[in-house]
Amino acid sequence: GEPIKLLAIDLGASSGRVILGKYDGIVLSVEEIHRFDNTPVSILEHLHWDVLRLFHEMKTGIRAAAREHDQLRSLSVDTWGVDYGFIDDGGRLLYSPHHYRDQRTVACRSELEGRVPPAEQFNRTGNQPALINTVYQLFADWQQNPALAGTADTLLMMPDLFHYLFSGIKAAETTIWSTSGLLDAASGKPSAELLERLGLPAALIPQQVPAGTVIGQVLPALQEELGIGPMKVISGASHDTASAVASIPYVNKEGAAFISCGTWSLVGMETSGPVINDKGYEFGFTNERCFGGTNRLLKNITGLWILQETGRCWQEAGEPLSHIEMVRLAKAAGPAMARIDPNDPLFGTPGDMPERISQYCRWTQQQIPQTKGELIRLILESLAFSYSDTLKKLEELTGERISVIHMVGGGIQNELLCQLTADITGREIIAGPVEASSIGNLIVQLVALGKLDSARAGELVTRSFPCRSYQPAGGISQ
Ligand code: ADP
Ligand code: LRH
């Protein structure tokens, strides 16, 4: 019969896409309908997401899909973590949500940490304390904008916000909320105690739903505007990393780690429950929820963002380079003469990355890269070394030996990064799928619609999307 047709809307911190998925019961095929940049806007010295533009681009994608295909059954949005918008009691969006790299949290850090020390935050929530976390942002909003207490009725995390704009339904999906630093790790519910000690109203948080919930339908007026029929809105694994991990075609989950490579690099393993101990805290790990309720023990590494920002600087200087050219130059440059710690705060905010990397090398008394190729190579090798270091810590934390690493996400199109990771970790890399978040998004929708058994998802991905394997070449070691 007719295949089932669904739309995945995947918003990364650098770009968004509307993907059409078709499932005939055997194979899942995907077609990219619309891709758009996700460019934050700095206004009045604060960094914001352009949500109206993003919603407009989503609509453009849906309209385009509807022109070619009828019977689109459902849609689901997944986005990057931690960010949110406010809705007032009339259902209106209050203002364009802040970007997690906005610096308003800095001034409130010590006040927050005086009330709930970082180690306690970690022990309660399983989330690694970080200035980007929802809890830091929300606390800063409450301190710096007292009027919010009177106007903000509901807090919607980014994907929940878009689901609301599509359906009119307000919900709090658990995977995205598990990035907030506000959920109790054990119960998976908002921590009443944490909220109270920070003076934040629990009433801001709408009804919680698990990943894979049909929350409503696209609003009638939107159906008409977009030229679609009735379409379900599904709250999926709405954190992009949760979606990406839902797409991993594990051969054997035991001894398998993952690296989700996009703007960020997320390095981790699935575990049955949160891993909360002093070492995990000290090593900088975090615990987030997966589709199905299991746990993801992972570390956030400032990833290809550093290369993106570098590329942006060169572009602004009138010397743009494509991804392919960057990889070619880095290959030609040969082994890097210096290394950075990608998680150094120096690399966390927008700015002149090439200059900051030189600065870092100067401070650490290393050779300063002289050419673009050397600089790119330095970034990629530094990432691979930090992956390797993180994987060793993961082995120490879990007591498991990692034998294979699944790499997923846009960054795996950088085959030099994949090969360096194989070489430096000494492990086999299985790379794929590239569009991991979109594919995971579609899988969760299929499960929610009762069309796929979640235990069969890995096989479906293996059947439907090519993966590439990289073997360690030997010769490079830490
Ligand atoms: P996000 O979801 O965070 O927006 P993606 O998963 O789309 O990120 O991955 C974006 C990254 O993928 C870019 O930073 C870039 O480094 C890398 N990338 C994208 N296309 C290519 C390509 N053709 N070759 C090499 N790298 C690529
Ligand atoms: C990756 C990601 C990551 C973090 C960051 C803010 O896109 O979702 O897991 O939460 O964005």
Image (spheres, grey):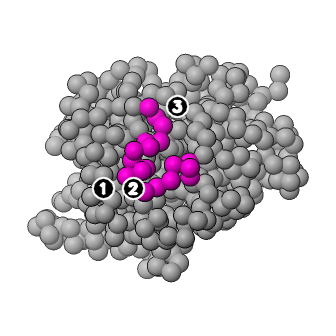
Q: Which residue is mark 3?
A: 291
Is 163 drawn above or below residue 21 in the view shown?
Answer: below
Which of the 4 quarters of the picture holds residue 53?
Answer: bottom right
- The span shown in magenta is 187-205
- Tell me, yes or no, whether the two marked residues, 2 and 3, touch with CB atoms within 8 Å: no
Q: Which residue is mark 1?
A: 115
Q: Which mark is residue 234?
A: none
Tell me the CA gap for discs 3 and 1: 32 Å
Is 339 drawn above or below residue 282 in the view shown?
Answer: below
Which of the 4 quarters of the picture holds residue 371?
Answer: bottom left
* Quadrant holding the C terminus: top left
Q: Amino acid at mark 1?
A: Arg
Instruction: Identify which residue is drawn at 56% across, 52% down.
Output: 204
Which residue in the rendered view is the most extreme toward the left?
365
Q: Position of residue 59 (x, y in %)?
A: 75, 56
Tell me the CA gap for discs 1 and 2: 7 Å
Q: Nearer the viewer, residue 34 or 441?
A: 441
Labels 1 and 2: the sequence-earlier one: 1
Q: Amino acid at mark 3?
A: Phe
**Does the magenta-highlighted stretch encompass residue 261?**
no
Q: Amino acid at mark 2?
A: Leu
Is 183 drawn above or below residue 222 in the view shown?
Answer: above
Labels 3 and 1: the sequence-earlier one: 1
Q: Which residue is mark 2?
A: 198
- Tell me, yes or no, whether the two marked residues, 1 and 2, touch with CB atoms within 8 Å: yes
